[in-house]
């Protein structure tokens, strides 16, 4: 085959180089015409983006409607408990903040998908959107692991390492997590994430996701998978397994309470696996195969499955506050106080005379916050240990 020549203005050398290795290795022929570079076999392009056009707006719209209000409430509840020097609330605050930041930029991704994966906004917004997406993925898994360790220490070893269960220590850990994940994902802010789709006759502008992956991208993805997914998963499974063993062997815990704890631990673990495992499995396969792949059928299959699993990860923005905040009886009390306060503010002044205001009761409350409903039960066990 003759040497590959640079494309016209609408497709630069940098853009075409991403596709050159794949398409040449696949035996596909490129031809230059008056309108730019075209493919003689367009069937080998990823697809016409029809899947993305309907999948992402549907899933992301559901996430936006549910995630934003419940994460705002979760932030409120966490703030109350942080003021009461509860160390666990620091992790919950960071978790809700990560979910909320991701949820508010989902409309940009909806617009992108609805227009056939065509980014119509600025390159800076593309970088910020991709950065916040990955920050959500890996700060979420990190803070879920932190919460698991905190519960493990409190319930399995209540009298040991108490200095690791202070508000100050939780704040330091949270800052470190944010900084490390920010550094890890800063490469997104340094690279130009806008490029043309050479497979599309409409010359769409793609944001972030490149096909096929370059070698340096694959290497970064493998690092993310190990540090951002596998390590937190191992920590979560270990901690909840030990908590379950401690509950099962403790005679002070009644059978009904044990059943609740088992159900909650199972739900938390399964939710984590369902939200993050499919995406990281496909990302792993892409990272080890795609830079060297010469099989266009494999390329098409990975593209579609990857996009489906990417949409699935956004559901964690809904699952996190429900599992880690709204199932707690003390959190429910704070939420009910908030709702009563809001309802009282809407009443005429005459109806509020000599009534006890929930706002003041919320401020004066001495409720000790715990993450999940099992902690109310297990705290009794810890006191007897």
Image (spheres, rainbow, N blue to C red):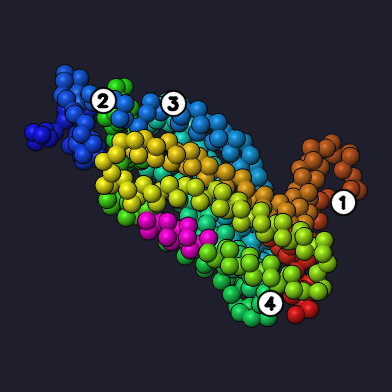
Mark 3, secondary structure of its residue: helix
Residue that label 2 marks:
41
Q: Earlier in the sequence, mark 4 or mark 3?
A: 3
Q: Which class describes the residues within 10 Å of circle 4: few (<14), some (14-19), or many (20+)?
A: some
In this view, the mark in front (2 or 1): 2
Q: Is residue 158 in view?
A: yes
Q: Is residue 212 within the magenta segment?
A: no
Quadrant of the image containing the C terminus = bottom right
Asked if disc 2 and disc 1 are in contact, CB closer than 8 Å, the reply is: no
| Element marked by disc 2 | loop
Q: Which residue occupies 82% across, 61% down?
A: 256
> For the magenta stretch, what is the residue range?
222-233
Instruction: Provide residue 359's location: percent of width, then percent of height.
Output: 78, 51
Q: How would you rate the neighbour count of disc 2 (Cα within 10 Å): few for under 14, some for 14-19, many for 20 or more?
A: few
Q: Position of residue 187 (x, y in %)?
A: 33, 52
Mark 3, residue position = 50
Question: Of tags 4 and 1, which is closer to the observer?
Answer: 4
User: In the rendered structure, which disc, 3 or 1, sits on the residue that comes first in sequence?
Assistant: 3
Task: Find numbered disc 4 in the image and state the secondary structure of the residue it sits on.
Answer: loop
Where residue 139 sits in the image (x, y, percent)? 50, 56
Q: Tell me if label 3 and label 2 are in contact, CB under 8 Å.
A: no
Can see residue 9? no
State the quadrant of the N terminus: top left
Q: CA distance from mark 2 to mark 4?
A: 65 Å
Nearer the camera: disc 2 or disc 4: 2
Q: Position of residue 118 (x, y in %)?
A: 38, 29
Point 72% across, 60% down: residue: 262
Q: Report, in whole angstroms, how far the alpha carbon at label 3 lies from the one at label 2.
A: 19 Å
Q: Residue at x 43, y 41 (%)?
A: 306
Label 4 – label 3 distance at C-alpha: 54 Å
Residue 356, numbered label: 1
């Amino acid at each position: 085959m003759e040497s590959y020549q640079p494309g016209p203005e609408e497709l630069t050398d940098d853009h075409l180089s991403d596709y050159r290795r794949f398409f040449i290795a696949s035996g596909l022929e490129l031809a230059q015409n008056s309108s730019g570079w075209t493919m003689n076999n367009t069937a080998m392009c990823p697809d016409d983006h029809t899947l993305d056009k309907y999948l992402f707006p549907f899933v992301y719209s559901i996430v936006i409607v549910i995630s934003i209000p419940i994460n705002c409430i979760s932030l409120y509840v966490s703030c109350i408990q942080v003021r009461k020097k509860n160390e666990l609330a620091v992790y919950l605050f960071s978790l809700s903040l990560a979910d909320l930041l991701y949820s508010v930029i989902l409309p940009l991704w909806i617009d992108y998908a609805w227009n056939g994966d065509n980014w119509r906004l600025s390159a800076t917004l593309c970088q910020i959107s991709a950065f916040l997406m990955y920050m959500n993925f890996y700060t979420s898994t990190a803070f879920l692991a932190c919460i698991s360790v905190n519960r493990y220490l409190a319930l399995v070893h209540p009298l040991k390492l108490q200095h690791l269960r202070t508000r100050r220590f939780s704040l330091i850990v949270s800052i470190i997590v944010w900084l490390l994940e920010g550094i890890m994902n800063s490469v997104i802010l340094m690279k130009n994430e806008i490029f043309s789709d050479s497979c599309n006759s409409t010359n769409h502008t793609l944001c972030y996701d490149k096909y096929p992956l370059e070698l340096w991208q694959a290497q970064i993805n493998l690092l993310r998978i190990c540090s951002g997914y596998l390590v937190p998963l191992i920590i979560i499974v270990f901690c909840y397994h030990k908590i379950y063993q401690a509950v099962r062997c403790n005679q002070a815990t009644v059978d009904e309470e044990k059943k609740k704890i088992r159900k909650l631990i199972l739900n938390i673990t399964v939710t984590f696996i369902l939200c993050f495992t499919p995406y990281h499995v496909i990302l792993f396969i892409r990272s080890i195969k795609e830079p060297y792949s010469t099989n266009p059928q494999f390329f098409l299959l990975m593209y579609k499955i990857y996009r489906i699993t990417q949409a699935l990860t956004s559901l964690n923005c809904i699952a996190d506050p429900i599992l880690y905040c709204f199932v707690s009886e003390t959190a429910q009390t704070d939420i009910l106080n908030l709702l009563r306060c809001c309802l009282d503010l809407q009443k005429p002044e005459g109806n509020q005379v000599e009534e006890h205001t929930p706002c003041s009761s919320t401020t004066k409350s001495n409720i000790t916050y715990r993450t999940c409903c099992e902690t109310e039960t297990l705290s009794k066990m810890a006191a007897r240990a």
